Image (cartoon, helix red, strand yellow):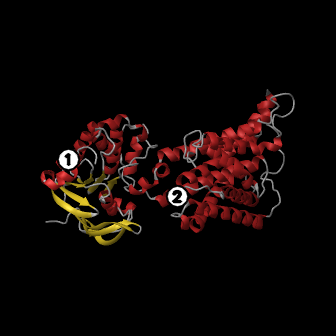
Amino acid sequence: MSAPVLELDGLYAGYGETEILHDIHLRVDEGEIVVIVGPNGAGKSTAMKAVFGLLNITRGAVRLAGTEITGTPPEKVVGKGVAYVPQTANIFATLSVEENLEMGAYVSSENPAPRIEEIYQLFPPLREKRRQPAGSLSGGQRQMVAMGKALMLHPKILLLDEPTAGLSPKYRGEIFHIVRDINAAGSTILMVEQNAKQALGIAHRGYVLVDGQNRHEGTGQGLIADEEVARMFLGAGGHG
Amino acid sequence: MMEFLNFYLFPGILLGCIYALGAIGISLTFGILRFSNFAHGDTMVLGVYITLSFVWLTDLHPLVVMPLAMALTAFAMLGMDRAFFKPFRKSPPIMSVIASFGLMLMIRSAVQFFWGTQIQAMVKGIQPPLQWLQPLMLREKQLYILGGTVILMVAMHLLLTRTKIGKAMRAVSDNPDLAALTGINTERVVQATWILGASLAVAAGVFLALDTQVETNMGFKMLLPMFAAAILGGIGKPYGAVLGGMVIGIVEEVSAYPWIGTTPLLNPGYKAGVAFAIMVLMLIWRPQGLLRGRQF
């Protein structure tokens, strides 16, 4: 079997002196949707930021298609085929929708126009708003801009940090739908989600993190069926 | 009416052009590097003296040699950025502010050391107002200032909206963290910011020198109105800086018009206070500026 697209191998990491992740193991294979769930403060988003060189890694390794990228600064990670959509402030609000997409292709010297056309086909509402400042769009459409921008360079893997946070249930479903479409179109996805049940529903595999450590892992359906997991996050529904 | 146009409104517009060009650099530096650059006025002075030297050497019109002086000053600014600002890139902004203060004093002292402190003229002789524009009193050099400002503004607009580096500058100004996550090369953007800001500052300085004279503290005198213009327009917004510069230039001149009775409404000696008053009022009532810039 070929090397996983992304692998976190025994990762210890944190902000400055504060260690948040203790010995995290995580693997994403080509073509998968992998979801990380867990209670607040479990280190879900932190694990994602570690991939992007945004925090101090004290031990362990991050590998991209078998090549170690531990501690590579974010602007270089982009060039290696990783795209990251942060949870908040994930668009350039004062730039137009089209300019946001162009910025997504900043590291490439090719003409972005054909790819922008493909992104409009994936997210039709963006086409008619192409000249508007991205900040003037609705929450769901902003999320489309953020994802479209991240997809501009055909990343090997797309990291999504709580893409449905703060969205109404209607939009939430739409976003999960889009995530599945993006995946079907060939992108590998690692996603952190609070809406655990829905997210695991579309995931090939999932990880449960608690207190910065691996607690469970399994297939999406398997985790939904797991009693302890269900008791921990799935019972209450909605956010939490 | 003609008196108002010739002695109040036109000088106000000219001054406004000069403030606007100068304020763009201050606003861009604040938006992208996130600190108030007090050395901006003296960057302008450096450019003016480089232009003056080229005029002495070649005997050409200052506007002909100005592009070369803009390029040289921008180049010098990149060197100064490397030496004095880059080490503080990840430090709190106050470090860069203090560094800019030091740089301001260093540039001015260097200029005084090499070129002396006496007042100089950019172009010799007195220019009469143009005959064909009578009764409007405009001099040829003033038309150059207006035209030059328009050309530079259009160029800046095209740079910011049509080029990749210009869009990246706006992106970094909008959201620096996301810009880094997107792979935008922040250092390149910073360099472009210095080049654009310094070039426009040199143009502002040369225009001011054409309209008045060359002196080593002209940059310091410009600092307050330029900051006031940047704040008025909305800090971090280059178009706001243009608007703010025009407003402050015009208000400064027009406030001396005898609106009531026969004496000036405001003694021209208090002109500089006008910019200060506008800045203070703006910070109290609308700190985000006319065009919704960043708040202090």
Q: Nearer the viewer, residue A108 or A202?
A: A202
**The image quarter in which residue A54 lies:** bottom left
Question: Residue A173 appears at what percent x and percent y?
Answer: 24, 40
Residue A30 on image: x %, y %: 19, 58
Answer with left or right where residue A86 lies relative to residue B139: left
Q: Quadrant of residue B270?
A: top right
Q: Which chain does the residue under circle 1 lie in?
A: A
- Inspect this view and state whether residue B46 appears: yes
The tag on residue B79 is none
Residue identified by numbered label 2:
B190
Residue hosting label 1: A235
User: Disc 1 marks which amino acid?
Assistant: Gly
Which residue, as the protein is rendered here, is positioned at the far bottom? A59
Residue found at x 61% / y 65%: B80
- Asked if badge 2 and badge 1 are on a common chain, one would say no
Instruction: Name which residue lies at 67% across and 38% down.
Output: B247
Q: Is residue B124 left or right of residue B75?
A: right
Query: In which chain is the residue bearing label 2?
Result: B
Amino acid at dot 2: Val
At numbered mark 2, what does the secondary structure look like: helix, strand or loop? helix
Residue B215, position in %: x, y?
Answer: 78, 56
**In the structure shown, which secondary structural element does the residue marked by tag 1 occupy?**
loop
As displayed, is residue B88 above or below residue B296?
below
Residue for point 43% across, 46% down? A92
In contact (CB < 8 Å): disc 2 and disc 1: no
In which image quadrant can residue A45 be found?
bottom left
Residue with the most extreme right position: B262
